[in-house]
Image: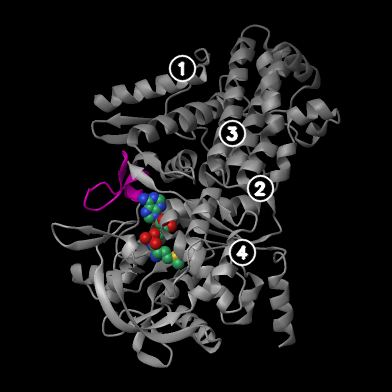
Amino acid sequence: MLIRRIKLLKCLGARCSSSHYVTTPIFYVNAAPHIGHLYSAVIADAHCRYQRLRYPTADVRLCTGTDEHGTKIQQAAANHKVPVDQYCQEISSRYREVFQAAHIHNDDFIRTTEERHKQAVAQFWRTLHSRGHIYSAAYSGWYCVSDEVFLTDSQLRLDEASGTRYSLESGHPVEWTEETNYMFRLSQFQDDVRHWVKQEARIRPAKFEKILLDTLSEPLPDVSVSRPSNRVHWAIPVPGDASQTVYVWLDALVNYLSSLGYPNEEFLDHWPPAQQVIGKDILKFHGIYWPAFLLAAGLQPPQQLYVHSHWTVDGQKMSKSKHNVVDPVQAAQQYTMEGLRYFLLREGVAHSDGNYSHVKALRILNSEMADTLGNLLSRACAKSLNPRQVYPQPHVEHLADLLRSVDAAKRLRDSLLQLSERCEAHYECNHFHLVADTTMAALHAANNFFESARPWELKTGNEGANEPRLATIIAMTMDALRLCGIVLQPIIPQLATRLLDKLSVPASQRGWDCLNENFARDSISRSSSSSSRRSHDLDGQSSAMLFQRIMEEKDKAVQQKPQPQPQPAKRSKSKKERLKAAAAATTITTTS
Ligand code: MSP
């Protein structure tokens, strides 16, 4: 008892020191995963990977899973003429497989049909009930099965012609319902929830805090938290009343507790969540119902809700009826899974909807992953320039001379000096697009430096005497690649690993602190710490071909066969020229 109280107090304090519990929404199993679902998971995964990289002693834990109860799942199974449990199992496995393929590093995958979850929901219900927050009442109103939510008249649109009412927010039809339900006293938590929402950085991006506060400016009605079992039987029974089942949103939200072992006390080791990633459509459930349920149960609500907007496809909402739902597995066949991860995090911004277009994906991946990152690695590792296949050590005098005489070397140094601090600030806010921007800017600077320093000219004539300068140019370029590889690990974990493997960077030197070890820092600190990074062999086993250009072949995008890297290369293009060239290449091949 005493231990429990101490743990509870610790938990109610600022933040459980080393625990960093992160969740994704759990995904409905009424249809297969699409890129919008993957996006929620990739944001949470990149966030956790950054936390592990930046705070190696933190106890980071990521939970995801599937939401398997309710009428719409029941109906989907019936439409497919498959028993509902088998249907849930099949779709849940597809989520698991897609997340594995996308290297989502989750510590748990919870299914709401698991026994551990049912126990947790029953206990959570009993706690709310015993604390007097649940009562029985006759309820009548409009229910939307697709969204699993009761709606008020002001939240509906009437289609005069058919007489059907639709949810204003989601556009899904609603049906009239009259039944006896259990109600939760949400109205009593209005002030507490408002207070919670208003805490610094509680809801991010800030525009979603405003949306919640607008909702909270009107009196909150109590909410129904059960349905009659004869209407919704694919659900968890209400403890002590078999005639009712638990409302699917209450059931679903409790997954965040059941994954931690709730009601066993160990759950307090990780509670409350440091960040819960959700899409904008489920803001009300997580920003109003969820903190109210938790406060009613005597538990602390999450530290932060991170809300992302949606992906549209060529400007249209994704939907089965429009046949424009993007399957991540198919998209990965075109772009590779790492390419897809990069595109989603590079192009998506949380505060507004992103448009998914094949042309844009092709242009970004070819220009950034293939031409800017991949090509630079190939050139620095090319046998013609680097016959001994080493990651050399810079020579102090040549480094000083290059920094003095080559403008592009100074720009590269400045870019690398700011890289860690800038990317850290962006990662702390989940601004992955800005991390990608900053990293690409550093890689452009490295490409420009490589072009300006013209290392291939040092291979003609007096090679022995030119060797130290050539080694210094390659070392500076490889430092840029190494630093960008370390920074990009949370966003493209597999590609970053392949890059760092090729450069033979030991696992112990891939951490965030290692960003300080590079020629740029050495050049300003004078204490030549570069001696700790001696010249070493590249990994002969791994390829220097990181990301191949994707070429359009009729209607199918394919990755181009590896091309030998020409030396010397063409003049480095400006950013505008590069984008234009990439767009032109795409247009030509797309229309061919
Ligand atoms: N099961 C509920 C969540 C319960 S959490 C306790 C649910 N499931 S869902 O499968 O419909 O959605 C899961 C996540 O995918 C949500 O965060 C949702 O916003 C996100 N997305 C669904 N469509 C999306 C896009 N088109 N774009 C981006 N994310 C989208 O809601």
Q: Within 10 Å of the Cα at label 2, are there few (<14), some (14-19), or many (20+) other Cα atoms?
A: few
The image quadrant of residue 153 is bottom left
The image quadrant of residue 476 is top right
Give me the disc on residue 78. none
> What amino acid is labelled 4 in the image?
His
Q: Is mark 1 within 8 Å of ligand 1?
A: no
Q: Nearer the viewer, residue 507 or 419?
A: 419
Q: Position of residue 492 (x, y in %)?
A: 52, 44
Give me the disc on residue 195. 4
| For residue 549, side relative to residue 502 (left or right) | left
Residue drawn where x is 65% and y is 36% of the image: 483
Boundaries of the magenta span: 314-333
User: Which element is circle 2 on?
Assistant: helix
Q: Nearer the viewer, mark 2 or mark 1?
A: 1
Give me the disc on residue 577. 1
Q: Nearer the viewer, residue 256 or 125?
A: 125
Residue drawn where x is 55% and y is 36% of the image: 436
Q: Quadrant of the N terminus?
A: bottom right
Q: Earlier in the sequence, mark 3 or mark 1?
A: 3
Q: Position of residue 250 (x, y in %)?
A: 44, 74
